Image (cartoon, rainbow, N blue to C red):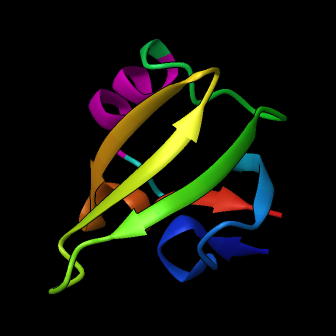
Amino acid sequence: MENLLQAKIGKPYRIAGFENAPVKIRRRLLELGLTKGQKIVLSRKSLLGKALLVDIRGYCLSLRSDVAKVVMVE
């Protein structure tokens, strides 16, 4: 398993869970639709690697890199 920060652009993944995420961040990710087993595709990375753009459940979501590294994908 790898985290979302290490994922390749354009390749579809499934969310496997959250690793060492604080409860506040985990709850917010679940509210945004990042649930276990959900299909996710990394669309873009910012030039400096500080943000990621992902497609999930039919909408685009921007995540900071510190939040993306706790999302485990397979």
Quadrant in which the C terminus appears = bottom right
Residue displayed at 55% across by 19% down:
33
Q: Position of residue 40 (x, y in %)?
A: 68, 45
Query: Does the magenta-highlighted stretch encompass residue 25?
Result: yes
Q: Is residue 7 above or below residue 15?
A: below
Answer with the quarter of the image where residue 19 lies: bottom right
On the image, the x and y values in percent for residue 15 come to 73, 46
Q: Is residue 31 above or below residue 55?
A: above
Q: Quadrant of residue 4?
A: bottom right
Q: Is residue 45 above or below residue 42?
A: below
* Residue 54 pos. (x, y %): 48, 48
Check the image and name the residue furthest to the top: 31
Q: Main secondary structure of the magenta part?
A: helix
Looking at the image, can residue 19 be seen? no
Q: Quadrant of the N terminus?
A: bottom right
Q: Is residue 47 left or right of residue 12?
A: left
Relative to residue 70, is residue 66 drawn left or right?
A: left
Check if residue 63 falls in the magenta segment: no
Q: Which residue is painted at 41% across and 59% down in the image?
A: 68
Residue numbers of the magenta segment? 22-30
Quadrant of res 46: bottom left
* Residue at left offset 44%, top offset 13%: 31
